[in-house]
Image (spheres, grey):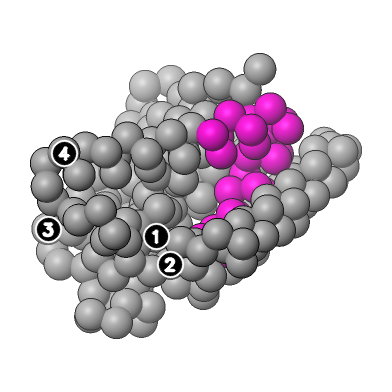
Amino acid sequence: MNSLALTGWAAAGACVGVAVGMGSRALMRTGTLSVGEQSVSAGVTAVLFGALGWRFGWGLDLVAYSLFAAVGVVLAFIDVIEQRLPGALILAGVLTVGASFSTRSVLAAAYADLLRAVTAMLVLSACYLVLALALGGLGAGDVKLAGLLGLVLGWQSWGAILVGTVLGWLLAGIARTLLRVARRVSRDAPMPLGPCLLLGAAVTILCDLAP
């Protein structure tokens, strides 16, 4: 993808970021994202669209991961603001990304990739559910998000699932430590996990970190 195409795709990402941010009004309990938050959401989404265009080039993989980026950015904002992950938005991400992967698997006969992605979605969700029931600290939104993360990472490889998951939890640990050192949160205060898990998956996909 040339620089002009990347710029255009990034601009499309900004527009999508604004649209999804504005649409979050129906999902948020506190109203909607502020103008400043919507601007940041649009900017981050634009950067991710551009980076994904550079990573994948034109194709259905670009569409799928761009949809994931658009949904993931808004999910991260809502989780930071309200400390919850709306199931409706996660479901929208699973359906749209899953449809893109399904189309890609039919056109390119990549049925093994689709099977791995769906299996990873179910397995990662089940693992998070077990953790939530056994240890606590994870909400229903985190369990649902695990399904979306399993889907996008599983399309890459089993190694991507492992690296993306570990990286997400590592980032969460680092963020928690920094907030505790800065005395921004108390020891027992809850911390939104979604942004770190989403960032871990995004970095793994963009940087192709899977072994």
Q: Where the C terminus falls, by quadrant?
A: top right
Q: Earlier in the sequence, mark 3 or mark 4?
A: 3
Q: Is residue 65 left or right of residue 187?
A: right
Closer to the camera in the image, 54 or 116: 116
Label 4 with label 2: CB-CB less than 8 Å: no
Q: Which residue is mark 3?
A: 36
Q: Which residue matches tag 2?
A: 85
**What amino acid does circle 3 point to?**
Gly
The picture quadrant where one finds residue 182 is: top left
| Residue pointed to by mark 1 | 75
Residue identified by numbered label 4: 181
Measure the C-alpha gap from mark 2 to mark 3.
21 Å
Residue at 36% in and 26% down = 4
The Cα–Cα distance between marks 1 and 2, rounded to whole angstroms, is 6 Å
2 vs 3, front mark:
2
Residue 159 image offset from top left, x and y in percent:
68, 27
Q: Amino acid at mark 2?
A: Leu
